[in-house]
Amino acid sequence: MTSQSEPLAGGWRAWLLSGSPASRRQARLGRLYIAWLGFRGNHLAMLGLGIVLTLILVAIFAPLIAPYNPNAQVLADRLQFFSAQHWFGTDDLGRDIFSRIVYGSRLTLYIVILVAIIAAPIGLLVGTSAGYFGGWVDSVLMRVTDIFLAFPKLVLALALVAALGPGIENAIIAIAITSWPPYARIARAETITIRNSDFIAAVRLQGAGRMRIIWSHIMPLCTSSLIVRVTLDMAGIILIAAGLGFLGLGAQPPLPEWGAMISAGRRVLLDQWWVATVPGIAIFVVSLGFNLLGDGLRDVLDPKSGGQG
């Protein structure tokens, strides 16, 4: 006998769109499916999703896609224009630019994922704690947040990397330290709106402690807004990482980081423009993809702000 919680002969679509779900799992999957239908109707968001998925696939299959070793130097082939052998030309050391762009996607993905993993939880914890406890806890945490927000991200990241030393790991730490304050602001605002809700009062009456309420009930409600903001911030993270690489404070040679590639190509920009232009286009396309994806997620996950702008 078929369970009431499983799709019947009407098919998965009818089961997901059922107005009276028979289980919590069916309700959750139904909400996800409705969100996907709304997201799929946004063509620009789908374009952004396609760009991000392409970045992920290129990073995963880089050894299969790249025709050459990204660090292999062939001085006899230096500064060649586009050709069948070198699709995006070669740099001043004879390295294949297409191969370096492909492997550079791994560094870009590595940076944005680690920054998100570090910065988002910090901002979420600080914001929910400040919003729920209020009083002096809110004042102290928010004043610290204001101090970080008072400095431009790139300037603060430069100062931190200068103190920590050049390198991709230190650049990731510096970018993460500069990225959490906006997330804390969003989480605090969300927490203030729901901390006096009836369901929070009911959980409190059941004997739940403050940290349990924050961890189990408030943080999950702040997640959707945080996901949207993190996705929109990916473009800024990529640009800051590229800026640090351009200044020689990020990924160090011979790593094929796109900002460092632009820095190396600026010396021959007038005559061999492709050396710096191709990695610049890669940064632009990936940043655009994350922005379009973030806008689409905002429309789906946060309908209140989707129509603004």
Image: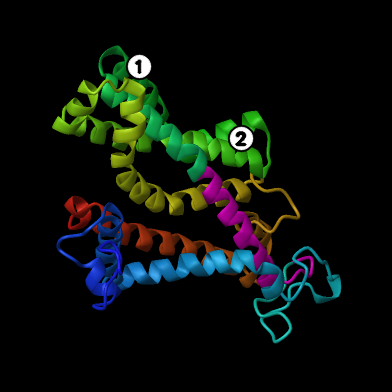
Q: Nearer the viewer, residue 191 or 14?
A: 14
Q: Looking at the picture, does residue 93 appear above or below residue 234?
A: below
| Residue 278 locus on image (x, y percent) | 59, 69
Give the prevailing secondary structure in the magenta stretch.
helix
Query: Image check: 47 left or right of 169?
Result: left
**At x 31% / y 58%, what residue is drawn?**
297
Q: Please state which amino acid type lies under the numbered disc 1.
A: Val
Residue position marked by numbered label 2 in the rendering:
161
Quarter-of-image position of residue 189 = top left
SS state under label 1: helix
| Residue 256 locus on image (x, y percent) | 69, 59
| Residue 178 locus on image (x, y percent) | 47, 35
**At x 65% / y 54%, what residue is drawn?**
260
Q: Which mark is residue 140?
A: 1
**At x 50% / y 52%, what residue is drawn?**
239
Q: Which mark is residue 292?
A: none
Q: Looking at the picture, does residue 52 appear above or below residue 136?
A: below
Residue 276 in view, yes or no:
no
SS state under label 2: helix
Q: Which residues are the magenta region?
A: 92-115
Indicate which label's residue lies in the foreground, 2 or 1.
Answer: 1
Query: Image check: 106 left or right of 300?
Result: right
Q: Could you tell me if the residues under marks 2 and 1 are in contact, i.e. CB atoms within 8 Å?
A: no
Query: Image check: 70 left or right of 219?
Result: right
Give the total number of marks visible in the rendering: 2
The numbered mark, 2 or 1, whose residue comes first in the sequence reads 1
**At x 59% / y 45%, what residue is drawn?**
244
Residue 101 is inside the magenta segment:
yes
